[in-house]
Amino acid sequence: MEAARPDATAPLALDTSPERYHHWRLSVAGDVATLTMKVDGDHPFRSGYELKLNSYDLAVDIELADAISRVRFEHPEVRAVVFAADLDRVFCSGANIYMLGQSTHAFKVNFCKFTNETRLYLEDASARSGIKFLAACKGTTAGGGYELALACDEILLVDDGNSAVSFPETPLLAVLPGTGGLTRLVDKRKVRRDRADVFCTVAEGIKGKRAKDWGLVDAVVARSKWDETVAARAKALAASTAEVPHGPAVTLDPLAPTITAGKLAYRHVTVAIDRAARTAELTIRGPVEPPPASAAAGGADQWSLRAFRELDDALLRLRFDAPEVGVIVIRTAGDRALVLAHDAALAADPSGLAREIRLLQRRVLKRLDNTARSLFAVADAAESCFAGVLLETALAADRFYMLIDGERIAVATSVANGGVNPMGSGLSRLEARFHGEPAQVPAILARGADGPIASEDAERLGLATIALDDIDFADELRIAIEERASLSPDALTGMEASLRFVGPETLETKIFGRLSAWQNWIFTRANSTGEHGALTLYGRPERPSFQWSRT
Amino acid sequence: MEAARPDATAPLALDTSPERYHHWRLSVAGDVATLTMKVDGDHPFRSGYELKLNSYDLAVDIELADAISRVRFEHPEVRAVVFAADLDRVFCSGANIYMLGQSTHAFKVNFCKFTNETRLYLEDASARSGIKFLAACKGTTAGGGYELALACDEILLVDDGNSAVSFPETPLLAVLPGTGGLTRLVDKRKVRRDRADVFCTVAEGIKGKRAKDWGLVDAVVARSKWDETVAARAKALAASTAEVPHGPAVTLDPLAPTITAGKLAYRHVTVAIDRAARTAELTIRGPVEPPPASAAAGGADQWSLRAFRELDDALLRLRFDAPEVGVIVIRTAGDRALVLAHDAALAADPSGLAREIRLLQRRVLKRLDNTARSLFAVADAAESCFAGVLLETALAADRFYMLIDGERIAVATSVANGGVNPMGSGLSRLEARFHGEPAQVPAILARGADGPIASEDAERLGLATIALDDIDFADELRIAIEERASLSPDALTGMEASLRFVGPETLETKIFGRLSAWQNWIFTRANSTGEHGALTLYGRPERPSFQWSRT
């Protein structure tokens, strides 16, 4: 697959594992894991900048995402994770500025989206998996470093007269903290808004007692008591979740997709990219065997886990390596009944592993919601199997086209459609779809319990956008895809973001919907990324010059 | 005041009245008013484009905002307003494309913000003043025309085989419907999201039965039954609100500010602009007399009405005519006790007029919240009177600086701080400020009921950001203002938008926070406003060419 990343010479290096990390060290001792950051300047995501002072780039964040996933699946004994750093006076200085300054707009936006997703995964693990996170900030905690801390359950800051938490983005770089920081400051930690205003404009940040008084950190701790306090707080956090069932462990094997020009091939997922047409055909194949006796028995190979890990991987590669693809056409292939059987088995399994697989499916479906491409789901063959958790991909799509072929082409529902896979808004995809007709949700689930819903019925019930017979179907679909691929990508991104996320707002939708939109805008402004912009000139002797119009 | 609008040769023409309208005709018959749009191409806001087919620009929208205000204050007999058009085949074709194409980014954004505020005023009048709105769409209803209809309580579309509602912005112009349309489509009218997706990409729109079936309009009506149906529906809407107290009428006299270089002077409000420093000093003077015996007795001259009309006017002039002003320093001057007396009298008055004055204050305070400038409130003289409804301006500010001078400088609370002036989020400004310490809200209101709260106490209670004595105050404030005025205006806008609006989200915050941010971004992208962008090339023979990267 031809890559559109700057400097990209190889497929995105998503497959990693702790023994291959360059930037983090994962160590597990009893129920506490420690993730120690020591960014290795010799292994940046690409050349052209130096990763000093524990600043990070995509390579660092890919390892972080992997580590969180390993803790969830491979270390079920862990109940608390401590973020620490191996530098003396620096915890983390945030996203690398030179990397940002050299990146394309598309890369910056996708980098921020990925880091945002990873931060939200910490909060997801805390809320649902009984794994608490402690930021042990023994040194400068700036920008994205503080945003990582904000995503944790508890923040400790060393009281050494020097170490501060800070958001220097606005005063120094003319951009926003891009990884949820502003939202978490006032909406999660509920820092008073005028104090947050002061904090966000003081480049050197706030330290010591004031950081505690303002609620920016949970405690400030003397150097002499640092190690024992961190250990004690980690133990206390671990003890607070002892009742949540965990395990058994499963080792996440490499996905090892076959990546060739125009194609990504996994065991259950295939992506065919037509760069000239600006489209990608994403096919998810259903399971070919009944579910394992238990999640534990199924291991890493079970379809519910493996297929969604593959889908996740494919979505990231499409985001980073195929930015010109405007329309993703989603198809499914397989046996509807087997998908439903896997959903049912997974839902009934009380183990921590089954829960982790369900939560992984839920996160991958959210990554699909947050993928800024037009999504058209298509059921046009008898082997189509938009059933249960795979039906969620059709409900995530902007449109769902179904060919009418008697009873042969149909969708089916399962427990996976009943609320266990909410969108960022907290609504299930059925609830979001029928925001104006809430009675349709139980009606469809009841109808689905009686058996497959063929295309005409699916259209009548509002599950399919359009159902057509084979005289019209192919032309209608072809024209719709061509038209969609011809529209402005920016307008489509804003339109889809507005239409997909109806109803209530949450920290999560605020981060992706509101904060990211402001950040997108600010990244395009001359004051940050223009020739004389602050991000462009960072580290150089020239001072930025601003266009002063306020909008 | 030197104007930064394109082509501006005179102060913004905000003062108007029905007999001077060029673009609308306001007629009242019993409890139904009709606002008929017939845009006069000879009276655009500025030269350079033609206002064809009932397309609108700022001049048209200033008249609309004035008309809504006149109905509320001058025509208390009105319970329903019909929007109609005086063209045969066109209701309204939306914001004028050529005007948008020729406008600066700052003007486009401020134009959209003003039109958004006016649309929200329709919904405010419907929800709180017992005035219902009917969009009588007898002809093409496109873009901003349909957005105006969406802000109404009911939409009728003529069934003539031709007239459609449409959002051609994305397919034709590579921008979003900029006046709340996407949000209202899925969150207010709750159109199914995949249908909304289809609707927003079909430039010619949707007409007839399908428009009704999809929930885009409330009824489609044959030409032969049009007039009688419109009249009947208007009567029914008027009857539905007959119990809401209205009146007595008061005539809104011209504000007639004195506008000179660097200064706006009203009776109660003064704005001094220092363009070199990029600051404005906004001073609101409190009442000098006790409140009138009743709102009716006070008429248009009463302080509670006049001062807030003036503040509203001043904010609009700052937005449009002083875009380089980054910091607005808000001061008050007068007698705290008199402000509290006016608040109390207004709150106790059961008349419709008193309610309208309260609602006007509330809307003006929201306009302050939504003004994209740094707001610093300053109490540094004994005459300072941040009391009651004026305290709301300090609570709206990003920071509040108070000089310590014994008991002489103080704030005071009234009923106006207790929830009757919510922000767009639905929270009062005290609730938003103390989002993390909700018990502070009743504590402060109880403390305020005992008398004024001097600076040191105000800081301790969290009302003041910083209280300092006169050794440090002046330097601290001067440096804070200079620093703020030196930061990137774009980053500040995004930062303030994220910190000001904590807590719940509503249709209103979604429109200003999410939709506007996306629109801001899209307006800056080459695909819309670049040399080969769709907005730039609209109406020319060249086809736009797009950069295809999806972000």
Image (tube, coloured by chain):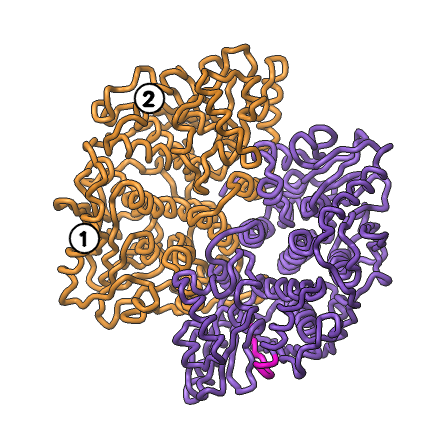
Chain colours: A orange, B purple
State the quadrant of the C terminus of chain A. bottom right
Which quarter of the figure has residue B201? top right
Name the spot of residue B206 as percent of width and height, x first.
70, 32
Where is residue A173 drawn, in percent x and y? 43, 62
Q: Is residue B466 left or right of residue B330?
A: left
* Residue at position x 55%, y 69% in the image: B415
Query: Residue under mark 1: which chain is it in?
Result: A
Gap in Å between the C-alphas at discs 2 and 1?
37 Å
Residue A241 seen from this side: yes
Residue A59 is a magenta residue: no
- Say whether disc 2 or disc 1 marks the residue closer to the N-terminus: 1
Residue located beneath label 2 in the image: A342
- Vertical position of residue A174 compared to residue A361: above or below: below
- Near mark 2 (Cα within 10 A), the count class, few <14, some 14-19 or many ≥20, is many
Neighbour tally class for label 1: few under 14, some 14-19, many 20 plus, Cα within 10 Å: some
The residue type indicated by label 2 comes to His
Left or right of B161 in this view: A61:
left
Residue under label 1, please give it: A236
- Between disc 2 and disc 1, the foreground one is 1
Residue range of the region highlighted in magenta in the rendering:
B328-338
Which secondary structure lies at badge 2? Answer: helix
Residue A270 pos. (x, y %): 40, 24
Q: Is residue A278 visible?
A: no
